Amino acid sequence: ENPQIASPIRTQAILNRYHLSAKKSLGQNFLTDLGVLDNIVEAAEITKDDNVIEIGPGIGGLTEQLAKAANKVLGFEIDANLLPVLDETLAPYDNVEIINQDILKANLPDIISQSFDSDKKLKVVANLPYYITTPIVMDLITGQTHFDAIVVMMQKEVAERINAKPSTKPYGSLSVIVQELNNVDISFIVPKTAFIPQPKVDSAIVKLTQRTDKPVEPFDQKAFISFVRGCFMHQRKTLWNNLQGVFGKTPEIKAEIKDVLAAVKIDAGVRPENLTVEQFVDLANAFHTLKN
Ligand code: SAM
């Protein structure tokens, strides 16, 4: 009987036997702490009623734990060199499918309808490749697919930005955009010693679930996202300055901006970091109404 894939001994043996060295360029840091894997599966509340998408199965350590708990696991792995490894390590599990694709290029709705029964819940669970944490999270939360939960490991610093409250240092466009759509929960912190090779920074498990309690809704989601990014373009400047950067500086436009700020009762002199998520939605919607 083999020890679990993610145990340090088995991970090292697999890497040696296949002459693999973790590719930094693909963000390969393999988890070798079975306690952390248990915590991830628990945070995602995986049961046999769940289908799971995993991003970057690597050598299969997390995949194995997901396969035991879930109905089915679909893994997207970009590194073709890992396919023969996964074939072997995951051979005991008949509920795992691996697709050799870049997650950022995959057509998720099509693949999901081909690979999964639709009567189950759908969750994303992953130890993300850190060089593309933000684009992956943005794709997942703004795409067409509804996920019952997204539970992903990322750099602690990015987790703190996603979870930040207004008027704190890490609060920025990422906080506003993610929190407008999701409830955010930092399930726990993972020290860098839980990986082979060790990353430079500590990590955190973030759980995102779609919000059902929104007091206000952006009229146009795409426009809202670019509006928020525009407002934070110059973080040290006032909202007034940033809004001119977004819309323009002519006297007519300045007058319009003043009117909108008065209508939503926001002081032109505040900095973007002082606004709540709901204030950003109100503001974006007020400009949207003005222009349509
Ligand atoms: N799940 C494994 C674990 O927890 O030990 C490996 C996690 S490792 C941090 C990230 C994995 O994502 C690597 O296997 C890497 O090859 C893969 N990866 C990197 N970029 C990817 C992409 N664009 N699409 C899919 N997988 C990717």
Image (tube, grey):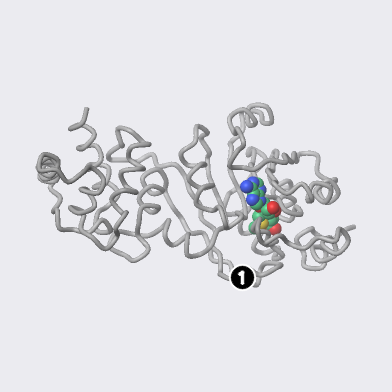
Q: Amino acid at mark 1?
A: Lys
On the image, the x and y values in percent for residue 82 come to 78, 50
The one nearer the camera, 42 or 203, is 203
Q: Which residue is mark 1?
A: 192
Q: Residues within 10 Å of mark 1 (few under 14, many from 20)?
A: some
- Identify the residue at horizontal 24%, vertical 47% (top origin): 279
On the image, the x and y values in percent for residue 112 come to 63, 31
- Identify the residue at horizontal 14%, vertical 46% (top origin): 261
| Residue 50 lies in quadrant | top right
- Identify the residue at horizontal 65%, vertical 72% (top origin): 193
| Residue 9 lies in quadrant | bottom right
Name the quarter where the C terminus is drawn. top left
On the image, the x and y values in percent for residue 57 come to 70, 50
**Taking 164 as reference, is 94 left or right?**
right
- Identify the residue at horizontal 81%, vertical 66% (top origin): 12
Residue 20 shows up from this direction: yes
Farthest front residue in view:
250
Q: Is residue 26 above or below residue 197?
A: above
Q: Is residue 279 above or below residue 190?
A: above
**Taking 252 as reference, is 35 left or right?**
right
The one nearer the camera, 250 or 291, is 250
On the image, the x and y values in percent for residue 209 come to 47, 45
**Taking 37 as reference, is 219 left or right?**
left
Residue 55 shows up from this direction: no
**Taking 205 as reference, is 234 left or right?**
left
Name the quarter where the N terminus is drawn. bottom right
